[in-house]
Amino acid sequence: MSTNFYVKGDWDEWERESEKHVGKRYAAGLYCWDCHASTPEKPVYFGGYKQTGHEDTCPKCGQTAVKEAIGVSSAGRELGFNKSKPMRKTGVASASGFIWAMQPEALEGVELIEDEYGTEYTRGEFMQMLEECPIQDFTGRL
Ligand SMILES: [Zn+2]
């Protein structure tokens, strides 16, 4: 479950997939937004390290996962059910990840970004969307 983002413009397919590919957002699993730790039930990977703990409990603070409806979860975001405004969460809840295909600085001066479904975002809206993506990968390995 993932969504690709591109710099909006009249590009040919090669340009779009290489130079204008901003990156890919995906449903990353459970994450403690307070401790910035992941849980082992659906582990989140940090730079290749898999963190471990107990089920859906944060290994640092012991909070357990909140029940999230598909309308607010990260999986729901990828499936189009979550239309809520993206924002940071608290406690143990689903998180999205974002794998950058370009350097974030390359977005300087870019006005519009679109996802693979054609939904447009201003750069501000895109940056707001990234609030929901505490796990970001800058290696460009998609
Ligand atoms: Zn925690």
Image (spheres, grey):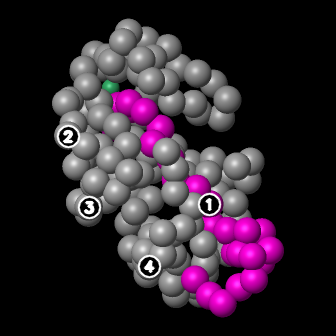
Q: Residues within 10 Å of mark 2 (few under 14, many from 20)?
A: few
Separation of residues labelled 2 and 3 (CA atoms): 12 Å
Q: Position of residue 64 (x, y in %)?
A: 24, 20
Q: Label 1 neighbourhood size at 10 Å, few (<14), some (14-19), many (20+)?
A: many
Residues at badges 2 and 3 in contact (C-beta under 8 Å)? no
| Earlier residue among tags 4 and 3 | 3
Which of the two labelled residues, at mark 4 and mark 1, occupies the earlier sequence position?
Answer: 1
Which residue corresponds to mark 4?
120
Residue at (80%, 74%) from the top-left corner?
Answer: 14
The residue under label 1 is 23
Ranked by sequence position, the earlier of labels 2 and 3 is 2
Ligand 1 in which quarter: top left
**SS state under label 2:** loop
Measuring 47% from the left and 38% from the top, which residue is drawn there? 28
Mark 4 within 8 Å of ligand 1, using the beta carbon: no
Span of residues in magenta: 8-34
Which residue does the numbered mark 3 point to in the structure image?
A: 83
> The residue under label 1 is which amino acid type?
Gly
Viewer-side label of 2, 1? 2
Q: Is residue 101 above or below residue 106?
A: above
